[in-house]
Image (cartoon, helix red, strand yellow):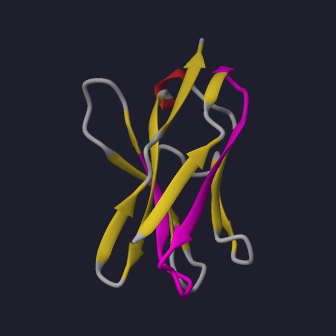
Amino acid sequence: QVQLVESGGGLVQAGGSLRLSCAASGSIFSIVPMGWYRQAPGKQRELVAIITSAGRTNYADSVKGRFTIYRDIAKNRVYLQMNTLQPEDTAVYYCYADVVGDRYWGQGTQVTVSS
């Protein structure tokens, strides 16, 4: 079993920054692909950023140049640094991890960007 716990969400003004953190625990015995999705009210969940086992990253076009995903292997954590936030970034952000063919999700953390 794998547990993911997100933190770092909150309310920020447009142009501001937040850093989300995802702490992984449980049956993870190697570096696994992880990433972030988000879901805004009335919209489908969309992929925001991923980081592969090898450390390669990929981003949604809407966040390229503003968001950065990175990991602390020793702490088993993945972070999402979000800069120049805009109201359209408002959503619940979910962390995921792919472990031995299964995808695990965190509970989500709310990010609200005011104009």
Does residue 15 appear left or right of residue 114 in this picture? right
Most foreground residue, 104 or 70? 104
The residue segment tinted magenta is: 12-37
Residue 19 figure quarter: top right
Rendered residue at 58%/26% (across/down): 86
Most foreground residue, 60 or 38? 38
In this picture, is 89 found above or below 83?
above
Q: Position of residue 74 (x, y in %)?
A: 74, 77
Does residue 58 appear left or right of residue 12 in this picture? left
User: Does the segment drawn in magenta span residue 18?
Assistant: yes
Q: Position of residue 71 (x, y in %)?
A: 67, 68
Rendered residue at 43%/45% (across/down): 107
Residue 16 figure quarter: top right
Query: Can you see residue 64?
Result: yes
Image quadrant occupied by the C terminus = top right
In this picture, is 87 found above or below 43?
above
